[in-house]
Image (cartoon, rainbow, N blue to C red):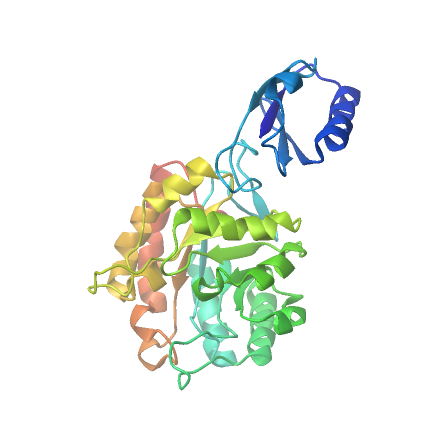
């Protein structure tokens, strides 16, 4: 349930209203002061609340019930877009960010070389997997804590914020100097992990599960926001369908749908979605045209010898070419690349 407050409602009136709601109906409240109007969201069992009784309050303009099970992440509760700041860069708010780097951190030379190349091409953040969830237990699982140390070195060398994936609550202390914590598709419904990340203030890049609906993605984001962390980036990375021509099926329509129903910024990962390097450019351009706030693209200095996902990784030269077109598309639709 949301209460739309009158523009002339005083702070004292709003405070009295909040106290009355807590005492009378035992619900939690979330006040959002938007650009055009202020909204008070009610969270809890609102089924027995008499809407007409609330409408009689002088400070209340209107009352509406919210049918969707996600509340904090719902645009009805938060009409203005959420903008997340990361080292002076802004995800959401009308500009585009490009997060680029290798699937896995393999060595200092590999990471630093790639990091410098993607920065030169215009990437605004560096990605790299220190802990890698792999389908086969015999595949390269990442360097772990050593990989995070190398990412921090690359951050110091290039000035790029770093994005890397967490797989276990046991590793959370290792992420103290990571700028954005990524939750991978396989962990989208690891609710204990999501709850713990809800107590963090760090931005969370939450990837859609391989077979999950948009509503399920938003409910997972709700787990994080319910803990107090509103710094969430929703990421479309392809879903499993009957199609076998690509690794997954990139759901481009998820971008405008998510931006309609939620205030959270949206990212797209064309690399994991397609699994084919030649498809990264067209899918990136499609995502930008659809209104994505960020792209996450895999780049490797030597894809043929990559320890993971070489087939979907661009060379630095290919990435530079793709970035030229991404920048042009972003300018054309009025969502320029973040400086």
Q: Quadrant of residue 179?
A: bottom right
User: Do we see residue 129 in this rendering?
Assistant: yes
Q: Residue at x 61, y 29 (%)?
A: 48
Quarter in which the N terminus is drawn: top right
User: Is 150 on the left or on the right of 324, as rendered?
Assistant: right
Please, is residue 179 above or below residue 129 in the view?
Answer: above
User: Is 323 on the left or on the right of 11, as rendered?
Assistant: left
User: Do we see residue 229 in this rendering?
Assistant: no
Please, is residue 29 above or below residue 37 in the view?
Answer: below
Viewer-nearest residue: 188 or 115: 188
Please, is residue 257 above or below residue 184 in the view?
Answer: above
Residue 88 locus on image (x, y percent)? 60, 49
Residue 246 locus on image (x, y percent)? 24, 63
Viewer-nearest residue: 142 or 193: 193
Count of numbered badges drawn on the protein: 0
Q: Residue at x 22, y 60 (%)?
A: 242
Viewer-nearest residue: 269 or 106: 269
User: Is 44 on the left or on the right of 290, as rendered?
Assistant: right
Please, is residue 39 above or below residue 103 in the view?
Answer: above
Residue 189 locus on image (x, y percent)? 49, 60
Q: Quadrant of residue 304?
A: bottom left
Q: Residue at x 49, y 64 (%)?
A: 187
Residue 248 locus on image (x, y percent)? 29, 61
Q: Residue at x 29, y 66 (%)?
A: 275
Viewer-nearest residue: 73 or 80: 73
């Amino acid at each position: 349930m949301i209460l739309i407050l009158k523009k002339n409602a005083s702070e004292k009136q709003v405070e009295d209203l909040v106290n009355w709601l807590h005492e009378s109906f035992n619900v939690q409240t979330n006040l959002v002061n938007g650009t055009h109007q202020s909204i008070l969201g009610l969270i809890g069992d609102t089924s027995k609340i008499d809407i007409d009784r609330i409408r009689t309050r002088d400070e209340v303009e209107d009352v509406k019930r919210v049918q969707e099970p996600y509340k904090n992440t719902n645009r009805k509760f938060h009409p203005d877009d959420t903008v997340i700041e990361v080292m002076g860069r802004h995800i959401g708010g009308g500009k585009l960010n490009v997060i680029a780097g290798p699937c896995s951190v393999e060595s200092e030379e590999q990471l630093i070389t790639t990091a410098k190349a993607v920065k030169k091409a215009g990437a605004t953040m560096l990605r790299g997997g220190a802990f890698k969830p792999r389908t086969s237990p015999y595949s390269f699982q990442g360097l772990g804590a050593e990989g995070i140390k190398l990412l921090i070195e690359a951050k110091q060398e290039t000035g790029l914020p770093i994005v890397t994936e967490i797989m276990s609550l046991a590793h959370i202390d290792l992420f103290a100097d990571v700028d954005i914590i990524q939750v991978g598709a396989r962990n989208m419904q690891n609710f204990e992990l999501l709850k713990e990340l809800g107590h963090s203030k760090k931005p969370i890049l939450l990837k859609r599960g391989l077979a999950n609906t948009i509503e399920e993605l938003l409910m997972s984001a709700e787990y994080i926001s319910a803990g107090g962390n509103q710094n969430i980036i929703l990421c479309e990375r392809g879903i499993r369908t009957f199609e076998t021509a690509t690794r997954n099926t990139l759901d481009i329509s998820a971008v405008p749908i998510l931006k309609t129903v939620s205030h959270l910024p949206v990212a797209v990962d064309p690399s994991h979605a397609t699994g084919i390097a030649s498809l990264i450019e067209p899918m990136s351009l499609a995502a930008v045209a659809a209104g994505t706030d960020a792209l996450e693209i895999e780049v490797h200095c030597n894809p043929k010898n990559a320890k993971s996902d070489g087939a979907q990784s661009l060379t630095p030269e290919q990435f530079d070419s793709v970035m030229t077109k991404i920048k042009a598309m972003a300018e054309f639709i009025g969502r320029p690349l973040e400086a």
